[in-house]
Structure formats: structure tokens, C-alpha cells
Image (spheres, rainbow, N blue to C red):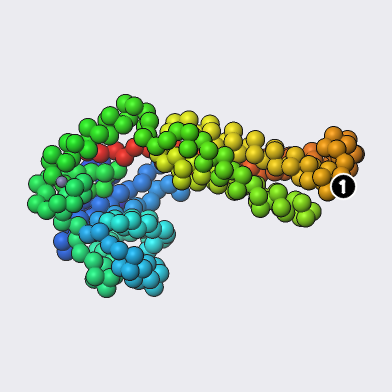
Amino acid sequence: MATIKKIAAELNYELDKRVAYGNHKGYQVTLIQNFSAMNAQDNFKILCVPFSKIDTTKRDTLVRFIAEFKKELRVVKYDINADLITIRLNEGFKGIKAETITSILDLLLEGFAKAGMSPLENCIYCGEEHPDTSTYIDRVKFHAHETCRQDTIKKVEERKATKYEGNGNALMGIIGAILGAIVGAIPWTVGVWFGWFVSPLALITGFASYAGFKILGGEYRPYVKYLVPIVSLITIILSNLVIVMMVAYMNDVSFTFVLQLEDVGDFLVEAMMFSLGFGALGLFYVFRKIKQDGDVAEIK
Ligand SMILES: [Zn+2]
């Protein structure tokens, strides 16, 4: 397997630890070697190419192009945002050589041309012309103005120091988390009511709660990682009780009467167990997402 060092040397790219930086026909290229001594699965290369901001039409054209040439582009997975494409490369058995990188870039640029895209030549921070330096955002190289770079580094430092306290409305965020969890709990509550085994649907409660938090509260806050699980699990417990309440209401008997029925007791314990189990599993994934959102970009 060609090492990143060898690739950088052959392509005449600049190397900084496990990241190679170069230029391909006017486009800045960052090639990152992800490395883990613990897990061979985590050893892969990521190709990042910034471009001038694109609209959805251009984006759609590029997405179609990538789908068509997924194999040739060696795409395992990729991500396109307004001005950057990130591709995790498939190394295959033989690994990736310098010439493979060149042909991948040639083909990718063909896709860019088809979509009417152009290199990102302006400052990544203010979008204005005549950048006078380079900056690195999460190791990806961009053009920038030195003043913009300094400003951003300062802002990031401040943000770290204040532990990401956002400007969004905290109360609205909490209400959003609660409403989101309720909406998320509806599908499986309805399903259980009809007697279907739908506990896996409880998975989405946490996602819905976090989505609600973001819609109404906006920014990341450290306490969201406690708020979302607590709200979600309480909502799941309550919706199980809502089912019992509905049974009581439909049969015109008291809540405690229904609870004391043997069948209902068994059903409730089982429903609680399964829904909380799946709810917790969902929260495991939500937690990862929250953590990602809380990460502040590393800027150099
Ligand atoms: Zn600038």
C-alpha cells in the first residue's frame, strides 16, 4: 500500500504529518490519511476539494455524476456541502497509488466541469477576493485573508472558553426537546395501541427530541446531552401510561382499575422494557450526533 508520504512525494504535494496538500488544475487538494494503530478498519484516505459555492442544481448534477462513476472515483462515502466535497476513498486490495489519486482527481474535475463549478479562489471566511494566506479547517486547506483567519481563530478560542453557550433561547430549546420527543413517541404509541410489536419505533424518540431542540432552541449547549435522554425516556414511560389511560377511558373504568388487571400489568412491564430498551439504543446514536455537533472546528 502506497503510503501518504510516497504519494505526496510523487505528486509533489506538501506533507504535514499524515496530510498531503497540493493543487490539481487550479483546485486545492487535501488528502488525509486516517490512521489507527488499534483498528485496521480505521486506516483509510480522505480526499477533500473545496470549490466555489454551488446551488442545488449544480449539486444535483454532481451527485448524479458521482453515482455514475462511483467505482472509478473509488467512493466509499462522500459528503458535499456548499463549498467542499469530502470523499472517503476505497483502497481496495492493492491500495491507492499516486497515479490513482491523479485519475480520481481528473475524473472528479470532469464532474465539476459538467456541473459548471469552479475552484474556490476567495477567502473561505468572508468570501471576498484576493486572499493572502492559507488556512486549515479540520486539516482541510483553504485560501483566506490573514485578518479573517486571525479573527476566526480568536472566535473559536472564545467559543471553547465559554463552553459553547449559544445565543439561542434556552427555554425554547427545552420546549422543543419535549415536543420533539412527544412527536417521536406517537408512531409506536399508536402501533402498540393496535397491538403491533412496534417497540423498535421507540428508537426515533431521541432523534425527534434532539431535532425539536434544534428547531426551537437552535444552538448546541452542553446540557443538551442530559436534556434529550431524560426527556426521551420520560416521554417513553408516559406514553406507555397513556395507553393504559386510553384503555381505562374507552372502557369507562378507572386508571388504577386497569393497572390492577393482571394482563395489563404483564403487558405494561413488557412494553416498558422493550420501548425503553429501544429508546436507549436510539439515544446511543443521538449521543454521537450531539457530540459531533459540540465539536468545535480545529483552525490553523
Ligand atoms: Zn476574508
Task: Specify few, some or many for label 1: CA neighbours under 10 Å numbering under 14, 14-19, or 20 or more.
Answer: few
- Residue at 78% x, 46% y is 246
Q: Position of residue 197 (x, y in %)?
A: 75, 53
Asked whether the viewer can see residue 38, the reply is: no
Is residue 31 positioned above or below 166 on the image?
A: below
Q: Nearer the viewer, residue 94 or 259?
A: 259
Is residue 192 positioned above or below 220 on the image?
A: below
Q: Which residue is mark 1?
A: 251
Q: Quadrant where the C terminus lies?
A: top left
Q: Position of residue 162 (x, y in %)?
A: 34, 27
- Residue at 16% x, 61% y is 26
- Residue at 27% x, 56% y is 83
Q: Nearer the viewer, residue 191 or 70?
A: 191
Asked whether the viewer can see residue 246, the reply is: yes
Write down the quadrant of residue 84 in the picture: bottom left
Q: Amino acid at mark 1?
A: Asn
- From this viewpoint, which residue is outermost toward the top? 161
Q: Quadrant where the N terminus lies?
A: bottom left
Instruction: Identify the secondary structure beneath mark 1.
Output: loop
- Residue at 17% x, 36% y is 150
- Left or right, 102 with respect to 43, comes to left
Give the mark count.
1
Q: Position of residue 105 (x, y in %)?
A: 26, 64
Badge 1 residue CB within 8 Å of ligand 1? no
- Left or right, 102 with respect to 282, comes to left
Q: Position of residue 258 (x, y in %)?
A: 86, 39
- From this viewpoint, which residue is outermost toward the front? 252
